[in-house]
Structures are given as structure tokens and as C-alpha cells.
Amino acid sequence: MRRTKAEAEETRHRILDAAERVFYAKGVSNTTLEDVARAAGVSRGAIYWHFANKTDLFLALYNSVKIPQEDMLEPAGAEAGTDALSSIEKAAAEWLDLMEQDEQRQRILSILLRCDYGSDLAPVLERQQEVDAHHTTLLVNAFASAMASGNLDARWTPHSAARALRWMMKGLCSEWLLFGKRFDLATDGREGLRLLFDTFRRSRPH
Amino acid sequence: MRRTKAEAEETRHRILDAAERVFYAKGVSNTTLEDVARAAGVSRGAIYWHFANKTDLFLALYNSVKIPQEDMLEPAGAEAGTDALSSIEKAAAEWLDLMEQDEQRQRILSILLRCDYGSDLAPVLERQQEVDAHHTTLLVNAFASAMASGNLDARWTPHSAARALRWMMKGLCSEWLLFGKRFDLATDGREGLRLLFDTFRRSRPH
DNA sequence: GCTTTAACATACAAAACTGTTTGTATATTT
DNA sequence: AAATATACAAACAGTTTTGTATGTTAAAGC
């Protein structure tokens, strides 16, 4: 029954894949390792071979995917030709597109949004906060450069603008993911972004 | 050991109270009924006397409190003297104040935000959606009346304004509750509201 | 005042999961 | 080709949690 190294890596991947689907369907703390094993077509032994326990499996899943939010706004600000505000808006809108198209992304973010953080997966929460903090920093910097070039309406500060954008994106995604996707994320989200950024630009001197 | 009816009702209340605190501290699916019993100073038997099981206890807790969001914007629109937009903003700001002061409210909303919805507490999710739908309707109506009286900037529709406000409030509360209240909800939230409503009002004809 | 029954506490049985151990067939190494 | 380590499956042991059944006491009802 010994598998080749490539086969082993494949079952490991199958387990992670199954875990993602089952966690999404039943919630993390309501799924047993037996559930994951069945969904992956292996025995619990295989899971315990590759992972220490459910928390470890969850962490491995968490680390195996690119976390949503992490990729947004990475290269923003370095655009040429467009103003800073437009590049932020573009990055946000593209991020929405990505989210709407990529089902794995949707599952991962759904799991993270509604999972019952006990003391065992505190590292996940910490990581989330780090990512959030980093993202906030990037956003504030981007808005600061927009302000420096006179693009940001005077009533807003880089800080308040970054917050407003983050809050809106978060509320938007939460409602879309947790309440059954009852509207078009990319379309309606872009519309919301457009209106918000319109207020950022407002009465700018030309 | 038989208690009077009033005493029984009091222990029932003590159980609900303890459940709220423990659910908040450990997460719903990570708390056992033994935990709740200890926190309430009773035995598990008392819980099983008053409730069928943990799900039933959770539902009872859910129904025993006034759900946040439900009370926001109830009487709005019926204000005299102020314009519709200002009364919406006032209602939202007051709701933030309430949330910041009322610790039970914070616990309840925290529990609802991060609890791991399995198939057993589907009714909770449905109820949430109903409340949200109702809230959205009220908001849209309020913004519609603002538009009718010429207060709402032409770029916004009642629908888009209501969505923007809801998304922002949701993201705001999520971040505040789930990430350790690292900013002042009432102050910073009011600031965000002020800026958002400022854009709603923008270039209104006077 | 006697019976009944509500309001629990306690004890018990049954699952449900978990983590570990053992067995084993096969890659891989030497 | 023999030895060894790998990648599991299957069985096992242990704990945690749940649900129920039973016991007990005092309040209600008559």
C-alpha cells in the first residue's frame, strides 16, 4: 500500500481540497475528521499521517491558499498615467471581479468569515489582523499620495478614506457571501465603489 | 428542592444569561452545556429541564434579546423640522452609541457574527435575513423620501445609498467587535457617517 | 393534611470523536 | 536482493459530551 512520493502529495492535496469543501458546507467546528476523510476518499489514518489534528489541517488549508485581501492593492500607486485614486479604485474593482469568478476564494473567505474562532485557532485570527493592518497601511499610503497630488477632497483624510473603503468592502463581501449572493458582486460593488470614489474626488481643483 | 414559579423563572434567566457570556467567551460550538451550567451555578439537569438541547438554548437566547439592527431606524422619517437625511444619520449615530454602551448588545452581535452556522441553526440565519430585508426596505423608503424632498444628491439612488450605508455600518461593526475594539466606535463611526452623509447631501439646491 | 407534580440534582448509558497503535504492502535505499 | 522506511488502513483505547432515567424535595392543588 505504500504510495510514491507524488501520489502521497496528491492525497495530501485531495485532503486539503475536501476539507475546504466540507468546512464550507458544514462549518469548521461542525465537521469531524471522518467527514473530511469520507469526502476525500481516504481513511482518517491518512489525515493523521499528513496533519497533526483538525486545527493543524485548518491552518494548513489557511496557509495553502492566497488569502483574500492580501493580494488587493499590492502594486497600487506605481501606476503611470492615472491618478492615485483611480488606481486604488481599479485595484478594488479588480479584486471584486476576482472574488466573483473564483469559487475557491469565495469558499475560503466564507469559512473565515463565519468560523467560530476558539482559543485553538487564535493564530488564524492574529494572522488576519496582521494582513488587515498591512492592508490598511498600504491603503493609507495610497490615499496619502492621492492627497499629496491634490486628488483627494479636503474633507477626507487618508485615514478616514481608507477606513470608509475597507468598511464598505467588508460589509459588501459579508453580505454577498453570507446571505446567498443575492446581488451581482462585480456590478453592484463597482457601482458602490464608483459612488464612493466620486465623493473622494469631489471638488478637486483642476 | 422544588422552587417557586418565580424562582424557576429566575434560574431560567440565569441560564440564558450565563449562556450569553460563555458563548461570547468561547464560541457557541466550543462550549458544552456543562460550561453553561457551571457559569450559571446550576446542574445540567436544570438546563435540560428548561431547554431541549444546546440548539434550543441558543435559539431561546436569540429570541430573548432585541436583535441589533432590528431597532435601528424604526421611527425614522417621522421627525419634524429636520430633513430626512439628517434623521437617518441621527438614527444610525444613536445606534452606534447604543452599541458602544450596551455590553450585552456587543456580546450578542459578536456571537452572531462569528458563530459557525451549521444546518441546525438555519432558522437563525433565516431570521437574520428577514431582519436585514426589513431594515433595507425601511432604509430605502427613508432615502426615497429624502430624494423626493430634494435632499439626496442626484448621483445616488435610494437603493445605492441604502446599500452604501448598510455595508459601511456592517464593516464598521465587524471590525470593531471582532478585532478587539481598537478604535472608538461612536467617535470614529460618527466621523465616517458624517463624511458619507456629506456626500449624500452634496450639491443640493437650497 | 394528603396527594400530586414541578423543579431540579445526580447517576447512568450511549454516542461521538479523538488520538494512538498496529499491521502491511510497497517504494526507496543500499 | 535485502533492509528499511513510507504511506497509509484498520482496529483500539480513552475521553468528552450528550441525552435520559431516576431520585428528592418542596410548592400547589384539593
Image (cartoon, coloured by chain):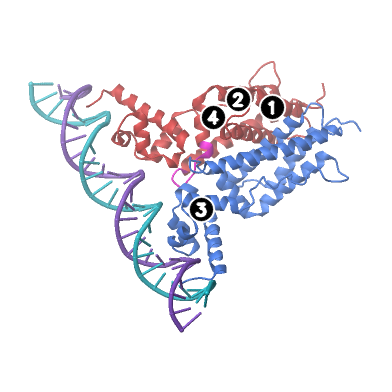
Chain colours: A red, B blue, C purple, D cyan
Q: Residues within 10 Å of mark 3 (few under 14, many from 20)?
A: many
User: What's under tag 4, amino acid-wise?
Assistant: Pro
Which residue lies at the image location 45% right of the left edge and 37% below the top edge?
A26
- The residue that disc 1 covers is A193
Asked whether disc 4 touches disc 1, contact meaning CB atoms under 8 Å apart, the reply is: no
- The residue that disc 4 covers is A68
In space, the residues marked 2 and 3 are separated at their CA atoms by: 38 Å
- The residue that disc 2 covers is A96
* Front position in the image: B105 or A80: B105
* Front position in the image: B151 or A80: B151
User: What's under tag 3, amino acid-wise?
Assistant: Leu
User: What's under tag 1, amino acid-wise?
Assistant: Leu
> Can you say whether B88 is above or below A14 in the image?
below
Q: Element type at marker 4?
A: loop
In space, the residues marked 1 and 3 are separated at their CA atoms by: 41 Å
* Mark number, residue B57: 3
Q: Is residue B77 left or right of residue A158?
A: right
Question: Numbered disc 4: what chain?
Answer: A
Residue bounds of the magenta highlight: A112-121
Q: Residue B94 in the image: x percent, y percent?
A: 74, 48
Question: Numbered disc 2: what chain?
Answer: A
The answer, for residue A28, to whether it is visible in the render is yes
